[in-house]
Amino acid sequence: MSNTATLEINGEKYEFPVIHGTENELAIDIKRLRGGTGGVITIDPGYKNTGSCESAITFLDGEKGILRYRGYAIEDLAEKAGFLEVAYLLIFGELPHAEQLDKFHSDIKSHAYVDEEVKKILDGFPKAAHPMGVLSSLTSALTAFNPSSVNVDSEEAMYNAIAKILGKFPVLVAWTMRKKTGMPLDYGDDNLGYVENILKMMFKRPNQEYTQNDIIVNALDKLLILHADHEQNCSTSTVRIVGSSHAGLFASLSAGISALWGPLHGGANQAVLEMLEAIREDGGGTKKYMAKAKDKGDPFRLMGFGHRVYKNFDPRAKIIKVAADEVLGELGVEDPILDIAKGLEQEALADQYFVDRKLYPNVDFYSGIIYRAMGIPVEMFTVMFALGRLPGWIAQWREMRLRKEPIGRPRQVYIGENHRAFKNLNER
């Protein structure tokens, strides 16, 4: 196989190296294109064909429905590992042994508090504020209480910064939800596991004893694992490009949260529930909306089916469908919205139109159903996505800094006016 690619421009030929990934991916290395051709660049809106980095963290093959973290299949990790194990794997490259995992959890718990002044910042938000805006602001505000930048050349300093954000972020998530629901703030319980404590911080009522539900814990643990990383998506690329300016970890994560907020990215599971609500208000007829989805002239879009990257099936959806069935069975929730969701799922899996086009329910469809059944407000769905994606963002930021990647600075093709003579105000 050739190790070079030839590009011909205006009769001149230029050769560029071809990079081979460990999964047989090929990429043309064009970093010397502009300098070697006298200013020629490539243009690729949305970066659909452009690799921004080399990474050893996540492998994704959308055509074959493959997702692996550090070489481990997502199916194995979701079944056999816990969220903290997966976080450690993503960030540090290997699954932890028991001693490492215990220390990791202990170090995280030692940081599972935030400065009391943060409560004043939270109080400044109206109750109607979107939780993603609140979470992004609070994460950015952590920089004020931790002003020193991370020394990326110190393994200890890097580790401490990672433990610190993994300890504080769930507190911010829980407080964001409790602000939304009007409940007093809570720090949870240090004696609980990481995911168990997140649920307690979110749901404990001040006048009731909190009871843990293992099926709910298991479902959330799986959801967080499935969302932990997904290669160079919009928010992950944002974290890397902000970090490439040597902005701190907390500031880079805050930028990632803002990117995730968009309905085309992390807001997809919220969009699923909003669609289901609209169907309910229109009488709940699933067949009618399946027909609308197949009508090319109808603007209606069936949210939560198919995936832009996975052209076959979303491997995460297969895993979380089982957890969704368990949660709905355990909680026995009577909810017309969830009934509509189950109806759409059954019809799509049996409808030849959807089967032929591989428009299967995706992870956003099932995660929205689980979060609603758990009693999480729809505006919090993207916040829960951010909670799961946190270790992936950290891993990507750490990798980018350790590889000493240059500051991100895309080029452009200018299509505006040519040079124009300036006219004084009285001449215009």
Image: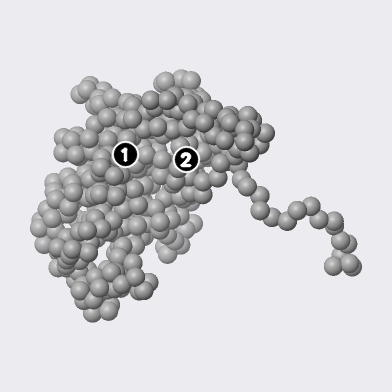
Compared across the picture, whether 255 is left or right of 182 comes to right
Whether 308 is drawn above or below 114: the answer is below
The C terminus, quarter of image: bottom right
Circle 2: element type: loop
Q: Residue 169: name its quadrant.
A: top left
Q: Residue 271: name its quadrant.
A: bottom left
Whether 95 is drawn above or below 275: the answer is above
Residue at (20, 66) in percent of width and height: 344
Residue at (33, 60) in percent of width and height: 270
Residue 135 x/y as whole percent = 42, 50
Residue 106 x/y as whole percent = 28, 29
The N terminus, quarter of image: top left
Circle 1: element type: strand
Whether 115 is drawn above or below 203: the answer is above
Residue at (22, 22) in percent of width and height: 97
Name the foreground residue: 117 vs 319.
319
Residue at (37, 39) in percent of width and height: 231
Determine which of the numbered discs, if any, sits on residue 60 in the image.
Answer: 1
Mark 1 crowd level (few <14, some 14–19, many ≥20, 10 Å Cα): some
Q: Tell me which amino acid carries mark 2.
A: Thr
Q: How many marks?
A: 2
Camera sees residue 207: no
Mark 2 crowd level (few <14, some 14–19, many ≥20, 10 Å Cα): few
The residue that label 2 is drawn on is 50
Determine which of the numbered discs, if any, sits on residue 251 in the image.
Answer: none
Q: Are marks 1 and 2 in contact (CB under 8 Å)?
A: no
